[in-house]
Image (cartoon, helix red, strand yellow):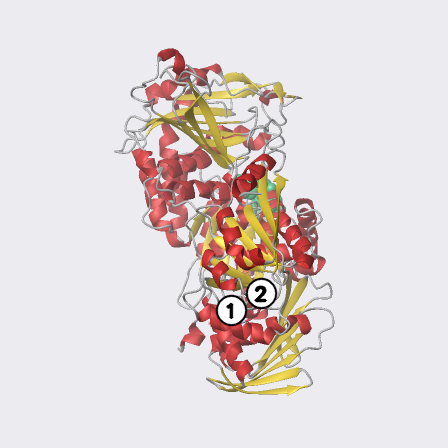
Amino acid sequence: MSVEQVERELARLRMDEDGTPGLRASVLNLVTVTDEESAGEVTRIVSKLAGRFPCRAIVMISDTEEQDANLDIRVSAFCDVQGGTGSQVCAEQVEIHAEGPPAHHLMSLAGPLLLPDLPVFLWYPGPFTPNLPEFSSMADLADRIVVNSAAASDSGVCLQELSELAQDTSMPAVGDLQWVGLSPWRSLVTALFDPPDRREELEQIHRVEILHDSRGESRALLLAGWLASTLGWRPESARDNDGAREFVFDGPSGEITVALDPGSEDASLRRVRLYGRELSFQVSRHRELTEAMSTVMRGEELLGERTVQLGFFDQDIILGEELRFRGRDESYAAALRTVAEMLEL
Amino acid sequence: MPETLQQNVLRDEQRLPAVPDPGVVVIFGASGDLTARKLVPALYDLAQGRRLPMEFAVVGISRTPMSHDEFRQKLRKGLDEQRAGSVSEDVWESFSKGLFYLPGDSKKPETYEELKAFLQQLDEERGTGGNRVYYLSSSPSLFSTIVERLGEAGMSQEEEGSGYARLVIEKPFGRDLESAKELNGDILRYFREKQIYRIDHYLGKETVQNILALRFSNGIFEPIWNQHYVDHVQITVAEDIGVGTRGAFYEEAGALRDIVQNHVMQVLCLTAMEPPVAFDADSLREEKVKVLKAVRPIPEDEVGEYAVRGQYDGGWVFGEEVKGYREEGNVAPDSETETYVALKLLVDNWRWAGVPFYVRAGKRMPKKSTEIAIQFHKTPHTPFSGPDTRGLEPNVLVIRVQPEEGVSMKIGAKVPGSGFEVRSVNMDLLYGSAFMEEAPDAYQRLLLDLMLGDPTLFIRADEAEGAWEILQPVMESWSKDGHSARYAAGTWGPDEAAALLGHDGREWRRP
Ligand SMILES: NC(=O)c1ccc[n+]([C@@H]2O[C@H](COP(=O)([O-])OP(=O)(O)OC[C@H]3O[C@@H](n4cnc5c(N)ncnc54)[C@H](OP(=O)(O)O)[C@@H]3O)[C@@H](O)[C@H]2O)c1
């Protein structure tokens, strides 16, 4: 298929029943690089995204190991019919299978298919490293790179690489779905210190405990990195007991220990506890996991408590959150820098 | 104080949504319809979505005797009706612990002493930090009394370090210029303008806010948004429903007070205003007030040439036979209350000199629709021959607010084939559907804004009065001679309304 054929086919798919071309409202380009196994999942996410982010998705499935050149292009459109009015919102998807030599030149395939005038998000749903062969040329096309630091086999290494990438101003801004997933937690932890009389406690935090599971390692590290970077804690030393890690920081009011316990059984991030001078604070996922409970205690005395929705954790919603954000995320970059320092200890 | 103590350094303003400070919302009129149907569900949504502080409480006041628990149960019932199937037991359990009820008559000073003590207790027990929102959702006849009682009890003051005291006034804000002025005077005796939040829930609608986005974030519209290019403007706020169970209320109000004074005037302001310097409360409201001031007063003896009122008879709306207004419940059989209003307004300023704004609002119209149509001038000259341009009409830009948000533009295009026949083609972009986020309910947005202390989307004293002032001659003339023109339900209003434009050689659009 040529570029013209792809465009014509997409226009045909958007056609209304009476044969007139449906007007297209689009807000962005989404380019993803993935493999054969994950392609189905990516397609599912794009189709669910269509309602909120009508976009052109270019899904690239590449196999550089193959010797023979092979190129296969398929197009589809996912349309959501809006409440009763019959008007459609569509996401267009171009799926490109490239094997052999073309797989080394993905940019030449993606570039001409981008919708003009709209931002380009480059999304790596799978393991990501900036050393991927096509990455630097694809990054040239992109306005923003979206990765999932938990998909890497070693999320520590991934976070370290991301930290460098985030500091490289010649590169587009970087976003991480794990960081997005952390936002509700950050909101809830932040809210614990909104009453003015709690600020002093925040300065006096001396111990933090984070309970996570293996999938949640990168989130747990980012949470620790965020707290440390915003509260001015400098990483001093690290200990590893059977996977349970402990980091010691030097902060404005003394030493702080952050313990990461990978013993969670049912959630990537299960609970975070912060110990101040007189009060202790906790945010933990509720029985049903869709909710989270925050509590404030003085010793055994319960001072405050509430339950809210933690948010929805479908991939398409998390990705959608990330697609709303433009520009460089300073807190994320700062958290990453601290994580990198922690991991170097 | 070190910086970390002044503000919560964890707050990431770039990425995390703003959350109000701890506080209490006191609702006067807590046993009423609005509380159960709108206010509490909106607060619940905010709580569920982590948009409320942990230290938060609602205190409801009305005369009906109820315990805290009965109040909670009543509100839960309302919530289940409004948010069927999406209420989380755990979130409700935690949210409802912050709902309290104080039975009391808002006319009696004792009620306020009791309230004051209760609020202090909440500050201690729930850490609500002395911040209070007083939400007046009881009948408008009580607004002044409640404000006075609050003031006398010393509850309207914001002292250094004592937290905020904000007053929210539901519509209607007065029933004419004089009563609005009186109400403003009554309120301003105890509260400063900065503390006052007058609600027009239309401004809380995402789609109404989008009028501003469309006008002021797109460079291509502003240069032609004036008398050089615009022939006239039509603003329509049409409802397909009748008065339903609100007959008694409507008999007192009528379309002019219920819709035109607030919603229509707001849409007019947003359409006609100059670009504000910033999107903040004062800049925006300043510009809106300038529009209201520029509207040419309608001479009382010429009201007939500028204003039309109508009342629906029985008819058919979308395949359903419906009653006439006079047959509705709690409506006088000889009622002349208007259910339809059309006005011709002129905005006497540099931008709009000579451009009429035709506005209309009505019930039992063929469909629900809110839109602004900017009708441009005809081209000064066409090179195409007469017969070729028969299907060509001047450009129209329509901003549709509801039901399907979007813009459409009528442009001339060549009909395929030989010759040079040109026709009008409608380009229709539903930009609303470009972001199919479910837009938050207007009350959610407004409650959040007021707790965050942002009055941009609320009405200022001079705005409320300015809108009444424009309508004053119409109300006076109508009160002297009480006849509403008839129109059949399911039509676009009485013939007299068509004549209002016909007189100027124009026609109403069909939305
Ligand atoms: N409902 C809506 O959809 C809607 C829409 C827009 C604006 N509004 C405005 O919102 C306000 C409330 O409307 P609504 O429909 O909720 O009215 P409503 O159902 O009639 O409620 C009025 C409330 O005021 C209380 N009340 C009356 N006299 C009182 C007194 N002396 N002391 C204490 N409480 C008293 C009533 O409770 P008790 O009888 O128990 O005392 C009741 O809770 C009005 O200003 C209305 O114009 C309503």
Residue B51: image location, x then y, percent: 55, 59
Please, is residue B308 above or below residue A176 in the view? above
Please, is residue B66 above or below residue A75 in the view? below
| Residue type, label 1 | Asp
Please, is residue B429 above or below residue B23 in the view? above
Residue holding disc 2: B54
Query: The residue tagged with tag 1: helix, strand or loop?
Result: loop
Residue holding disc 1: A194
Q: Is the residue marked by circle 1 packed among few (<14), some (14-19), or many (20+) residues within 10 Å?
A: many
Residue A308: image location, x then y, percent: 63, 61
Residue A62: image location, x then y, percent: 61, 58
The quadrant holding residue B353 is top left
Decide if residue A210 is on the left or right side of residue B354.
right
Residues tagged 1 and 2 counted as in contact (Cβ below 8 A):
yes
Please name whichever residue, A48 or A201, is drawn nearer the observer in this view of the structure: A48
Looking at this rendering, what residue extends furthest in the front direction? A68
| Residue type, label 2 | Met
